[in-house]
Image (cartoon, helix red, strand yellow):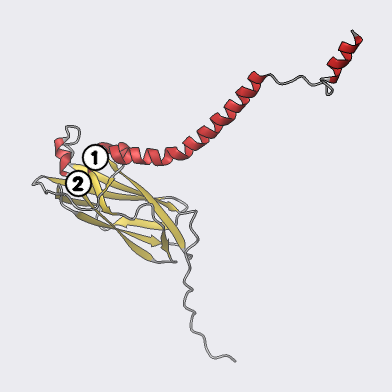
Amino acid sequence: MSTDGNNTTGNNTNGKKPVPRGHKATAYSLVVLVAVMVGLSYAAVPLYDLFCRVTGYGGTTQRADQGADRVLDQTITVRFDATVAGDLPWKVKPQQTTLTLNIGETGQMIYVARNLSHEGTVGTSSFNVSPAAAGIYFNKLECFCFTEQPLDADSTADMPVVFFVDPAIVDDKDTQRIGEITLSYAFFPDKDAKKAEVKPAAAAPTGADG
């Protein structure tokens, strides 16, 4: 009997109880689950962006390589506006606030941005259209959104957007009565970009030394 007791003690010299296999399997499953969730979180952004572009969800506009294949007699008005984040010292406005054109006709609007500070800044922008249902029919041929826009101190930049409204908008019962679309841009600092190079101010004229 004493021999059996010694052997039992020898098999567990540290006095620790062995971890049940079921607990180990649970721990491994949790690690795998966390890894999968992290991977999905990174994949969610491009998948959500693709979903928005395909469906026009949330007023997301479409990208096109060429203009519409037909132009209708029916017209539509596009309204333009811009907002600027408080920590970006810019003033941005479209050259005009509205533009009326035929559905399917290619239009262009230029947004003018001015850096109000005395140092170089870099901004970028996001956009959407309203009503949201019109997003899938609002096509951009050229756009400045999601790109770095450096501006030197006290300088300005012209940023064009070229677009058309897909004639299919009149075939959709949810959008066929839309007579006005608003294209909105939101500007904010590009915190990942290097600060724009500042051009030195011209030195004031001074008299001869001495």
**Which residue type carries mark 2?**
Val
| Numbered circles on residues, count | 2
Q: Quadrant of the C terminus?
A: bottom right
Q: Nearer the viewer, residue 11 or 141?
A: 11
Give the residue number, with chain letter if any, for mark 1: 134
User: Residue at the left extreme?
Assistant: 73
Location of mark 2 (residue): 165
Horizontal arrangement in the rendering, residue 89 relative to residue 6 (left or right): left
The reply to whether the C-beta atoms of the residues labelled 2 and 1 are less than 8 Å apart is: yes
Front residue of 157 and 133: 133
Q: Residue at x 82, y 20 (%)?
A: 12
Name the element at disc 1.
helix
| Residue at x 35%, y 56% (from the top left corner) | 92
35 lies above or below 61: above
Type of the residue with mark 1? Ala
Name of the residue lying farthest toward the right: 2
